[in-house]
Image: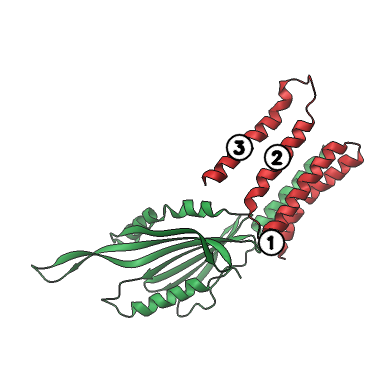
Chain colours: A red, B green
Amino acid sequence: MDVSILVLASASVPFGLIALHDIASGEARKGAFGAASAAWSLSGVLLVYLGVPGLIFFPGLLLIMIASSLSRVRRGGGALQYARPSALAAVLALVTIGLVML
Amino acid sequence: MAVVVSAYGCALLCYCTFFAMPVTPAEPLDALSFSIEDRVYSYFPRIHETIYTNGKAFVGVATIRTISAPSSAFSAAFERLDGYAEDYAREQYGIEVDVVPESNETGYEFSGHDAVRHTYAVVKAITVGYPPFETTLDVRVAEIGAMAWFCNVDFEAVVMFYVAPTYFVDEPDLQQLRIETVMIVEGVACH
């Protein structure tokens, strides 16, 4: 495997370490989503290397981020807490439409 | 907060390093009698280009550092090639030619990858016969090909263009040049 691919794969490591830090600090849910994002990114690099089309990985990452944002929504917390998942969903929709149209 | 900023900084540094790292230029098995000129076209993202020329034939290969490139993106770029080629011929050589799309394939099996392949005919108006009986014919004088694919094992995209002569009446030697051009094109691989 080329060094450049190892460098690309290592970009996920800092996020994985933050996720572990969150879990250790008692924020298990936040840490779990962080770990899922890091694992998804890392597996994306490995799977693209093995020949899987790379197009599915960015939408997948957005889905994990949307789920993470929605998991933090509290009842009676106001409409503003939906801003982040809504913005991410809009980006996901644009990316999906772009991929389909291209 | 500082930990999060540092993590994002490290990730950004990794991505920047990745895009700046040298590529392994895609090249043919044998350059035959073509002269070779290669250079780094861009350092960020890293793009290496190699130009093979021999008189009226040309093969250009660009190797681009990238995470992933959909075939559709290459197709979208290639669909504008006919206009660019006509303008280029007019501005560089003062020649009026028509560049006509002939084929386009998105799942073209090439060098072990799924490639995008577009081909164009270069049509030139040629006058034949002697006055007052001369007539003008539209002759397919050359073929332009554009191919691109993503080398997953290298995380590099390869974009290749070639121009090969297809009109041999005035210069029969061009037939051999066409064969050599096709051989070079078919021999290009990621590494």
Q: Are marks 3 and 1 on the same chain?
A: yes
What residue is pinned by disc 3?
A93
The amino acid marked with disc number 2 is Leu
Label 3 chain ID: A
Q: Chain of mark 2?
A: A
Within the image, what quadrant is residue B19 found in? bottom right
* Side of B83 relative to B44 (left or right): left
Residue that numbered label 2 is attached to: A63
Q: Secondary structure at mark 3?
A: helix
Q: Which mark is residue B115?
A: none
Residue pictured at 30% horizontal, 80% vertical: B172
Q: Position of residue B152 (x, y in %)?
A: 64, 61
Residue B36 seen in the figure: no
Secondary structure state at the residue bearing disc 1: loop
Amino acid type at circle 1 is Leu
Q: Residues within 10 Å of mark 3 (few under 14, many from 20)?
A: few
Secondary structure at numbered mark 2 = helix
